[in-house]
Structures are given as structure tokens and as C-alpha cells.
Image (spheres, helix red, strand yellow):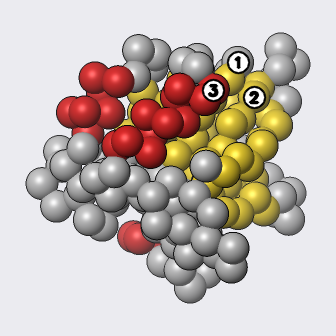
Amino acid sequence: MRILVVSDTHGHEEDLERVLQDIGMPDCVIHLGDYEGGEAHIQEMVSCPLYMVAGNCDFFSKLPLTQVVEIGGLRILLTHGHYHFVSVDTSDLIEEARANDCSVAMFGHTHRPLLDRSDDEVTLLNPGSLSFPRQEDHRQSYVLMTVGEDGTPEYEFRYL
């Protein structure tokens, strides 16, 4: 199963369109917030299951701030992260994932890619920003996640 994980497009849906042209339609798309009113356009361009949460810049969104989903046998916590203070520390997010029996917690907000497996129970994943990256090399990033038949996830950071 191929899962596209993106965040922080900030109204630049053309960046998501470029990714979908490059990789083809995955089995699932996850958007971790800050689409700034672009949710209808995103829903139109995606023809597979789509999971979205609202970010701190999604002022009029009716989408949830946090969502727990089961994909490929994994329980995954989806959130933008601003209510979990991820810019400062991820411990609150890890506790939320544990409380919801999730083995993966995905978040955005920082605009910096991150894969952290240092916790024995919860893997943290941030795909970075597809439109406004803040890491040192400022490359627009996303994650292509694959889940094998045995339920083992693999994460590949990719760049536009």
C-alpha cells in the first residue's frame, strides 16, 4: 500500500498536483493541515481515500484538528501539531498517540521533515512543507509511505 503524506501547502495546490503527476495516484493521501481554503480543490484532485485535518491557518475549516485512522493495519494519529506544541517539544504528541493506541503520529506545522523512531512505542513523522519549507536546504518535501503485507511501514522522503 502506497500512502502520500503532505502538509502545509498553504493554498498552493499546484504543488500537490505536481507530486501526483510524478508518483501517480497512491492508495491513500494524508494532508496534515494548513491548506488555507484549498480543501475542496484537494478533494477534487484526489481519487483515493483522503484524510485531512485542520491546521492553525485553516480558520474556516470544519475538518477535525485530530483524527485517528487505521491504514494498512496501523493506527495512526493525524494532527497539524499546533495544539500539541510540536514547535517546542513532541512529548505531548507522543502521549496523545499512546492514549489513542497509535503506533504512528503524523504532524506538520514546523515545515521541517522529521522521522523520529527514538520512542519504543510511537514513530513520529512530519513530511515537512510541500510549499514553504523551513529546513536548511529549503527543499519542498513530502513522504511516500509504504506498508507491506506484514504491516511494516517504510518512509521515503521525497522533494520537488
State which tag comes first along the sequence, 1 or 3. Answer: 1
| Residue behind mark 3 | 23
| Residue behind mark 1 | 1
Specify the label residue 146 is tagged with: 2
- Is 32 positioned to the left or the right of 24 in the image? left
Residue 105 versus residue 47 in the image, above or below:
below
Q: Secondary structure at mark 2?
A: strand
Q: x%, y% of residue 159?
A: 66, 51
Whether residue 93 is visible to the viewer of this picture, yes or no, is no
Asked if labels 2 and 1 touch by Cβ distance under 8 angstroms, the answer is: yes
State which tag comes first along the sequence, 1 or 2. Answer: 1
Q: x%, y% of residue 111?
A: 53, 68
Which circle, 2 or 3, is nearer the viewer? Answer: 3
Q: Residue at x 71, y 35 (%)?
A: 145
Residue 29 versus residue 96 in the image, above or below:
above
Q: Residue at x 70, y 18 (%)?
A: 1
Q: Residues within 10 Å of mark 1 (few under 14, many from 20)?
A: some
Q: Residues within 10 Å of mark 2 (few under 14, many from 20)?
A: some
Residue 121 versus residue 146 in the image, above or below:
below
Whether residue 52 is visible to the viewer of this picture, yes or no, is yes
- Is 43 positioned to the left or the right of 119 in the image? left
